[in-house]
Structures are given as structure tokens and as C-alpha cells.
Image: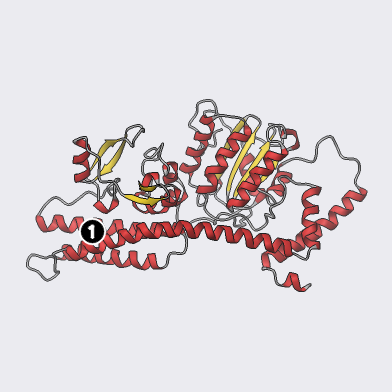
Amino acid sequence: MPATTRALPRPLQTLITVLAAALIALAGTVLFAPAPAAHAATGIDTVAEALRKSPVYVDPRASAQLPPAEAEALAKKIEDAGKPVFVAVLPESAEFPKATVFQDLRTKVGIAGVYAIRLGDAFNAHADSKVMSRNAVRNLVGTVQRSGGDTTAMLNSFVDQADRQARGRAPASWGGGEPGVGATGLITGGAIVVAGGAGAYALYRRNKRKREEREQAELDALRVVVDEDITAFGEELDRLDFHPSEPGADDAMRRDYEEALDAYEEAKSKMAAVNHPQDVTAVTEALDKGRFALATLAARRTGAPLPERRLPCFFDPRHGPSVQDVQWAPPGGAPRTVPACAADAARVADGEEPLSRTVQTADGRQPYWNAGPAYAPWAGGYFGGGLLPGLLVGTALGGLLSGPAYAAPADTGPDGGDWTGSDYNPDDYGGGWGDGGGFGGGDGGGFGGGDW
């Protein structure tokens, strides 16, 4: 093996070997194949082969919906984001049965990710649940459908959001080539082989560096707000006038106190180990658990009723567990119900502004829900488990609170971009375009029932 190839990472060595074999096979096909038919070979196998090489495939019969230049731009957008988002534009035909097209395509591609399909005039998307939660997919598809527009507008709108919300990274098999599949793609792959793998390695390093830089910037922003939360909780513990051996202290009080101390240490330990933005969710989960333990301890000491296990105060989780739900609307937005602490509930009732948590942005201090997607993992630790998907409609954080950093299971299923073959949860891809779906006034995407 040439020295340049030996220096490559093992996945790229494998890719180059496969491309070389494909180039040889192509050479024989080009030299000895009969004249081409009116349309290139199509079907699920062809689509899947294309999507393993590039994030966008357009069937030749559907090329009027997404012309080559627009398909190339969409593919570049996905590749630059480095996320496992797959897009197929297909004609409505017997080759792509509505009831099974998602399951068939996911099985054939074999890579965990987000799959969006424009089938004739219909659009829908499904995803592996760890890559993007069902709520996130359903909400995003519904938004795209209701926004309307032509195929290019709908796909770009979907990809813009999916690239920000999807977990994982682009599959190693993508080479940054043209959308679709065929001789051009294989010849491009052959050129990489001829170049000794140097081009592929440079592309691999560039995409990896971009992903790392983007993640680091998001993590740097998160560190500030999470460190503030940890410090605030530590100060609460310092101010706490409780001693386990004091008169009147019982075992239940001591357990509450120990839980609060343990939560503080857990938050610090997990923050020290954070490597990726989504890791901070576990930190804020620990802080929320610790604040509830303090609230329970305070009730026991005063003889008050024990607090109900509720979400933290929406306006600032540092205020501790909420005590009631209130009607509130962000500036220019529609009213919605949010959990609030006693002090903020009183302010809202009096027509005053609640004491909202603000964070630093390029435009100065802003409430966290207007600060952008970087804060979704932070909010997910406080409000995970199905907090009001419509709560933040119309804000910058918006639907991201129903995205993967907020609602997806943390340790189940493959990471986005991982090869799994046919080993995936079929419930994530069940069905296709059934009756009562999101098209024409259905449920806005209809993931669970397989509706289109």
C-alpha cells in the first residue's frame, strides 16, 4: 500500500479501496454497456446508493422540482453543517410505495440520521429517535408544510432547522461530491483514488475541523451560563442555616440535605467532564434535582406541606421549583402557560415583568429563549421530558426545546452518522403517506402514525 494511503485513518482507507473497485467496475460498464435508456436506473437501491455518497438525491424524473444547481447547493449546505441529514426528491410511482418508502430507504442506506423525502407533491420526514426526537420532527415538518413554497424553499427550510437540531455527524462515506449517483460520482471517487487519497484526507480534516470549531463555540457560550448556575446553587448551600446534628433534625431532613450536597458535587463533576454541548444537559438536570431537595428540606423544617415535584421556574431556573402555572406572552408573541416561582407568578399577576434569566449575545443581554440554539442543551436539563412543545413558538430557541438536546433519549440508539444496516427501531420510520396525515390539514407531519 502506498505511503500516502497508509497515513490515512482506517475508515478512509476502506472508502478509497471501495472507490477504486467501483471505478474499475465503472470502466467496464462504460466501455461495454448498451445505449442508455430514457431514464437512469431508479428505485430504492439506486436512491440508497446515492445517499451513502452524498446527502441529496434527485430522481431524473423529478429533476424539475429541484434543478441540479439547487440540489448541489442544498447538498453543500448539509455537508458544511456536518450533520446526518438525507434528502430525496422522488416521483410518485410504484417504485416508491408511500406506505413503506421511509422504512425501505432507511434499511437500504443503513445510516442513522434524519431522512426527508419529497414524493411527488408531498413532503415528510422521519428520523432515528436519538438523532432527532419525534416531537422535533413532527413540529418541524408541520412548520415547513404550513409555510408552503416550492420544493426548493421547503427543502431548504427543513434542512436549515434539521442541520441545527440533529445529533451526530455526517457519515464518513460522504465525499462532498455532487448530489445523486452515477458515472460522475464514481469518476470523482476515482480521481480521489488517483490522487493517493490526499484530497479525501484533506476534506475529512476540513469537515472535522469545522464541526469541532462550531461545537467549541457553542460550548464556550454554554460554560458561562452553566457555571453561573453552579455558583448560584453553591451560594444557596452556603447560606443554608442547617446542621444535620441540630435539635429537631430528623433522618428525612438529613437525606434532603445530603441529596442537595450530592447534586452540587455531581453538577461540578459533570461540568468538568463536558466535551460536547449536549453534555451540559446532565449538569442542569443535577442542579434541578438539588434545588428540589433544598425546597423539600425547607418545607420539612417549617412544617409546611411538602412541595410538589414540578418543573423549575421558566423565567429563571435558579429561582427553584415552580409553584404554579401562569399565562404569559413574550413581546409580540401569543400567550402561553408557563411554570413560575411564587415571586414571578406574583409579578405576572400584577402586570409586571418577571425576573427573566438573561445571557450574553452578539446583540447584548437577552432572555435565554431569544439567545439562539446554543442554549437548547442547557434548557433541556431543566425542562426535559416533554415540556410544552408550543411554549416557545415565535422565539429564537423555539422548537429546539423539542429537539434532540431537549427531548431525545441520551443513551439509546445509534449516534447520527453511524452505520447500523437494518438494525434500527422501525417505529421511528413506520408508515408513509396514510390517511389523516399532515398533508392537507392533518397533524402537521404525522410521525407516529406514518401519515403524510
Closer to us: 212 or 432 = 212
Q: Viewed as shown, does residue 408 lie left or right of 355?
A: right
Q: Viewed as shown, does residue 165 lie left or right of 196?
A: left
Q: Is residue 338 visible?
A: yes
Please, is residue 91 above or below residue 220 in the view? above
In the rendered image, residue 323, in percent from the top left (x then y), is placed at 21, 45
Label 1's element?
helix
Closer to us: 155 or 248 = 155
* Amino acid type at image mark 1: Ala
Closer to us: 197 or 250 = 197
In the rendered image, residue 151, in percent from the top left (x then y), is placed at 63, 33
Q: Is residue 430 visible?
A: no
Decide: few, some or many residues near mark 1? Use Cα within 10 Å; few <14, some 14-19, many ≥20. many
Task: Give the number of marks.
Answer: 1
In the rendered image, residue 64, in percent from the top left (x then y), is placed at 72, 32
Please, which residue is most extreme toward the top here?
440
Q: Quadrant of the C terminus?
A: top right
Q: Viewed as shown, does residue 216 lie left or right of 282?
A: right
Please, which residue is most extreme toward the front here?
363
Please, which residue is most extreme toward the left here?
247
The residue positioned 68% from the left and 68% from the top of the image is 10
Please, is residue 46 above or below residue 416 in the view? above
Q: Viewed as shown, does residue 177 lie left or right of 248?
A: right
Please, is residue 126 above or below residue 148 in the view? below
Q: Quadrant of residue 229?
A: bottom left
The residue positioned 84% from the left and 55% from the top of the image is 25
In the rendered image, residue 327, in percent from the top left (x then y), is placed at 27, 35
The residue positioned 67% from the left and 68% from the top of the image is 9
Q: How is the image coloured?
A: secondary structure
Q: Quadrant of residue 18?
A: bottom right
Q: Which residue is mark 1?
A: 293
Q: Quadrant of the N terminus?
A: bottom right
